[in-house]
Amino acid sequence: MTTEPQQTTSLQWVDNHCHVENNDKGREAISNAKEAGVNKLVNVGTDLTTSHEALSLSQEFPNSVFSTAGVHPHEATKGLTGIRDLLQNSNVVAVGECGLDYHYNYSPPPIQRAIFAEHIDLAHEFDLPLIIHARDAWEEIFSILEDKEPPARTVFHCFTGGPQEAEKALDLGALLSFSGIVTFKNAHEIQEAMLLTPIDRFMIETDSPYLAPVPLRGQQNSPCNLPIIGSYIAENRAMDLKVLSEQLWETTHSFYRIPIIDLIENP
């Protein structure tokens, strides 16, 4: 697959999954993203502390930075204390990230499963999207989702499955979110999954500061690199980049129910 970028400077993008710190470096990342046309960010919490920090940053940058609240499977032993309170804030647009990660098992699998199920309940209760982290645990994630019933708005972030997992997730009504991994030379199964996913059933993300896309692989990632991923996908789906960016803009706003307005300058 080709990695030649198309021109992106006049387009608007939403990074639907990133981890921007609440400090000067994070504020610089938001500014750099805007210069690259990445006018909105969904800043994702991974435990109570980072969820609070994400909320604070979203309040500082209204209508351009949005936050989520949840507990990453690595942190599942911390439990969900305090997360429910955060979900009542209108700046919090999703539950998560949450899920199962059996690659590292930093938290025992039974605790991961219990905490994931609690996240699903919260997404239903608050009518919020569910952001899923899935690694080496597809069968159990699908089983839990089927048992609990997937929330109406569910996304598999940083999708790393192949065509079979993609079709199963889509059959459950979920969206897929593709990160810089899709640009990696040997990510053939992820690329196949990307090609089979309908244009209105996926979003894109940087998952920064991780997983910088080619040709920046190995460097620290940032939301400003999102257009590289969009350009790669448009090129390999043989579609016009503007058409793709407009569809992603619409899909992402609809999924998170964030207002479709231009980025407001922060005083």
Image (cartoon, rainbow, N blue to C red):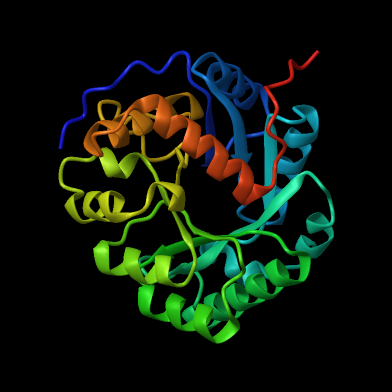
From this view, report whether residue 258 is shown above or below residue 88. Answer: above
Q: Residue at x 45, y 31 (%)?
A: 245
* Left or right for 110, reference 53: left
The picture places residue 159, in percent across and down from the top left corner, at 38, 55
Front in this rendered view, residue 119 or 235: 235
The picture places residue 113, in percent across and down from the top left corner, at 53, 79
Would residue 18 be seen by someone viewing this image from the given angle? no
Work out which quarter of the rendered image holds the C terminus and state it.
Answer: top right
Q: Residue at x 48, y 37 (%)?
A: 247
Would residue 75 be seen by someone viewing this image from the given angle? yes
Numbered circles on residues, count: 0
Q: Residue at x 77, y 30 (%)?
A: 62
* Left or right for 200, reference 98: left
Front in this rendered view, residue 84 or 176: 176
From this view, report whether residue 37 is shown above or below residue 46. Answer: above
The picture places residue 188, in percent across and down from the top left corner, at 17, 51
Work out which quarter of the rendered image holds the N terminus and state it.
Answer: top left
* Left or right for 235, reference 153: left
From this view, report whether residue 116 is shown above or below residue 154. Answer: below
Q: Quadrant of residue 226?
A: top left
The picture places residue 60, in percent across and down from the top left corner, at 79, 28
